[in-house]
Amino acid sequence: MAIVLYLIEKTPVIVSFLLVLMIFLCIYPVFHFFKQFSRRLLALILVLICTGLLGWHSWPRMPDNSKKDATQQGPILSPAATKAIAQEMAKAVPRQHDVEKQLAPEQQKTQARVAISKKKSPIKSSDPVPPSQSCPNGICIGGDNNGSATVNNNSYGPPPLTFKWTVEAVPSRKSEFPNEITVVIFPSDVYIPVSLGIVCDSEVGAVEFDFGPNGSIIASSSAGVAADNNKIAYISFNGTAMAPNFPLYVHLWSNGHLQVVQVAKATIKRPA
C-alpha cells in the first residue's frame, strides 16, 4: 500500500483526501487509549498539528517560472552594440563574387578529374571460362568428358511388412470352448486391406476380431479356420487400417492350451 501511495501523482485533491483519512484513522486510538477528556482533547490537537505539518510538507507546489525565464533570457544589448555585432557578421559572410572566385579553381580541378576518369582503359584478355556442366540429380562428371555416363539407379522399395503380437488368456465367452486367448497384433506399417493368417500350436475352434477400445469401420470381413489345416486361423477385411499405434484384436477359442506361433500376410482362397 505504501508503494502505491508513493507512486500515485500528488495532486491537491489526493493530498487533501489522504490527510482527512489520516485524521479519521487517528480518532479511534485516541478515544481507546485515553480515558480522560482533557487527554483526549490534547491528543486530538497534536494529531491535527502533525497532520497539518505533514500536509504543508507534502502539498504540491507549482514551479516558479519567473526565475527560469529570467535565467534563460539573454542579456539586453544596447543599439550601438547590436549595430557593431551586425557589422562583424557582415564581414564574416563572404560576398557572392568572392565565392565564385574561390569556387572557379575547384570546378576546373573537378572537371579535369572527370575528363581523366572518362579515358578508356585498355581491355585485358580475360581468363578462359570453364565450361558449365549439367548435373541432373546432383551427379556431375568433372573434366572434359564426351559421351554419356551410366549411373546405377536401383530403386529400393519399403521394407517388408512384419508383425508383432501379444497373447493374453481370458475367461472364455463361449460355453462350447473352455479356453480363450486375445491376440493383439501390431503391424510395422499401415496395412489395408487386411488378409492375415495366424498359425497356432493346436487346433483352433472359433475366431473373432475387432479393434478393441478403438473405433473402426469394417467392411467385407471374414474370419475362420482354414479348411485344410485347423491350426491356422484367418482374417480378412477392408475399411479401417491397421497401424503400429492402431493394433488389431483377435480372439481365438480352443478345447485345449493354445499358443500363437506365427502371424503373417496370407492369401485366402475361397471354395468355388
Image: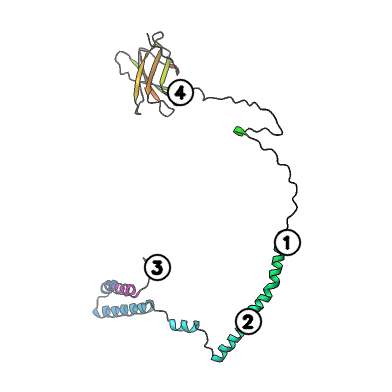
The answer to whether residue 208 is seen in the rendering is no
Which amino acid, by three-letter code, is at mark 3?
A: Leu
Q: Nearer the viewer, mark 2 or mark 1?
A: 1
User: Going from the N terminus, do you reach mark 4 or mark 2 first?
Assistant: 2
Q: What residue is disc 3 on?
A: 7
Front: mark 3 or 2: 2
Classify 10 Å Cα crowding around label 1: few (below 14), some (14-19), many (20 and above). few
User: What x and y, as percent, mark residue 48?
Assistant: 31, 79
Q: Main secondary structure of the magenta part?
A: helix
Per the model, the C-alpha gap separating discs 3 and 2 is 55 Å
Q: Earlier in the sequence, mark 4 or mark 1?
A: 1
Q: Which residues are magenta?
A: 10-22
Q: Compare marks 3 and 2 and give the one earlier in the sequence.
A: 3
Q: CA distance from mark 4 to mark 2?
A: 100 Å
Residue ID at (39%, 69%): 6
On residue 92, the disc is: 2
The magenta stretch spans residue 76: no
Amino acid type indicated by mark 4: Lys
Callout 3: 10 Å neighbours few (<14), some, many (20+)? Answer: few
Identify the coloring: rainbow
Amino acid type, label 2: Ala
Residue 60 image position (x, y, % from top left): 38, 77
Q: Residue at x 29, y 74 (%)?
A: 20
Q: Report the residue at 43% width, 22% height from top.
A: 165
Depth check, front residue: 91 or 231: 91
Residue 64 rendering spot, x and y as whole percentages: 42, 81
Where does label 4 land, which residue? 164
Q: Indicate which disc, 1 or 3, sits on the residue closer to the N terminus.
A: 3
Provide the residue designation for mark 1.
Answer: 116
Contact between labelled residues 3 and 4, with CB atoms less than 8 Å apart: no
Work out whether residue 37 can be spotted.
yes
Along the line of sight, which residue is nearer the eye, 82 or 148?
A: 148
